[in-house]
Image: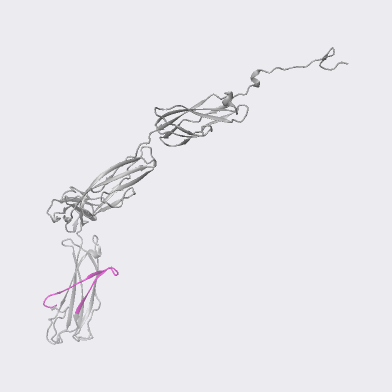
Amino acid sequence: MRRAGQIAGVLLWVVVLLPAAAWANNPPVVDAGPDLSVLENETVMLQGSATDPEGDPVVIFVWTVESSPPGGDAYLTSPYRPDPVFCASVPGDYLLSLVASDDPNAFETGRWSPPNRMVVHVVQNLPPVAVLKVDLECGEAPLTVHFDASQSYDPEGRPLSYYWSFGDATIPSQEASPTHVYEFLGTHVVWLSVFDDRYECGEARAFITVVADTNQPPVANAGADQTVAATGELTTVTLDGSGSSDPENEALTYEWSAPDGVVISNPDQSITTASLPVGTYELTLTVRDPHPWEAPATDTVSIAVVPADNIAPSVEWCLASTAKLWPPGHQMVPVTVSVKASDECVAPQDLLVFCRVSSSEPDDGTGDGSFVGDVNGADGYAQAVSVDLAYDEATGCWTGTVWLRAERDGAATGRTYSITCDVWDFHEGNLSTAGCVVVVPHDRRK
């Protein structure tokens, strides 16, 4: 009986021959990582890697600096790792290559991967640019100067620190925008040093001159407040700052400023004009002498433009706190006068209210007791006596007190005190008059 694979009693063995490539160990595939850009003397970690086609572990990496700029001094920590740290102090391009192997004896056998390359661009770290600004370069002692380095910058955008030397043997400052007070006369050299985080430095300087305090500040005078009637959509008024002065009689410069809606024709003149709509406005005059360190002087003027008004105020009432004085015992009695008035264009408190009181009998008439000064201590029969009224915010009325004597001529029909109030609204002819009376009757039945 024959077995399968036997021919005439001969055992046949089948041998399959494989290509030589099937037995070869392929080298790893290496990636040196992306090109990098760093500053001189700055360290950076390289990003090499490798994979093996057969999945064998990659056991050896070797980095090599193939080329560098003249004088280049590249330094690699642990060049047999995939991720060494690179550093160079000379700017330029550094060409680096990376090979790897899965053979622990690669240095003897020479079984390395093909090299993969990358470039490290080393650039010079430029110093910061120091920008020094001051608000005053000259002034009288004690002189306060505001310094500013906030516009300094680093070409690479690195963070900055500041160091100020004020030139007067005082404590330096490390603020970006310090303020310093100079007490000593003379010219002081100010140095600003700006550092980046790599200790590169940029510098700037300024000169501050401190002089003795002899100059006096000017005095601003914007003129008297004004109230004018509107002449149209815009009303022109004159601004007069010619009353401004300087103690040393030095030339002054002028600057008028106003709220929105007000147009000043020549704001740099002492006397000029302004065009204003209806309303009340505060305009400011600023005057300066020739010394830039001297603070300017300011003054304000209030200008009220009121609508054209030909209507007199309306008087709602004019009242006395009592209508009759009794008994006629010659005593002085306080009487409160109250006036309520309004106007279409002027607020009640801005009206002009005048009050006067007169008497129908002489002070020292027949049968009245021979007392004098019957109206606030004056003779109201010979001439009406003025009474001061003041505006009361709580009641919205103008009020005042007049003292009247409770007496009358015993042979007459009684005495009458006439209270007359004139109410004006600032405009010529716009007058309203109202009044009331207080009587001292002849007898109680009256």
For image coordinates 26% across by 53% down, the residue present is 181
Give the camera-side residue of 128 and 232: 128
Hey, which residue is sitting farthest top in the picture?
A: 8
Give the camera-side residue of 435 and 262: 262
Is the C terminus in the top left, top right, bottom left or bottom right quadrant? bottom left
- Range of magenta residues: 380-403
Q: In which quarter of the image is residue 193?
A: top left
For image coordinates 65% across by 18% down, the residue present is 20
Q: In the rendered image of this protein, does residue 72 appear above or below residue 372?
A: above
Q: Horizontal and vertical percent for residue 80?
A: 53, 32
Give the camera-side residue of 70 and 392: 70
Q: How many labels does the image show?
A: 0
Q: In the rendered image of this protein, does residue 417 appear above or below residue 13?
A: below
Hey, which residue is sitting farthest front in the picture?
A: 108
Q: Horizontal and vertical percent for residue 243?
A: 14, 56
Q: Horizontal and vertical percent for residue 151?
A: 32, 43
- Residue 202 visible, this angle: yes
Task: Judge whether residue 161 is colored magenta.
Answer: no
Q: Horizontal and vertical percent for residue 10?
A: 82, 13
Task: Judge whether residue 396 is colored magenta.
Answer: yes
Hey, which residue is sitting farthest right in the picture?
A: 1
Is the N terminus in the top left, top right, bottom left or bottom right quadrant? top right
- Residue 275 visible, this angle: no
Q: Is residue 276 left or right of residue 93?
A: left
Q: In which quarter of the image is residue 326?
A: bottom left
Q: In the rendered image of this protein, does residue 109 appear above or below residue 304?
A: above
Q: In this view, does 115 lie to the left or right of 390?
A: right
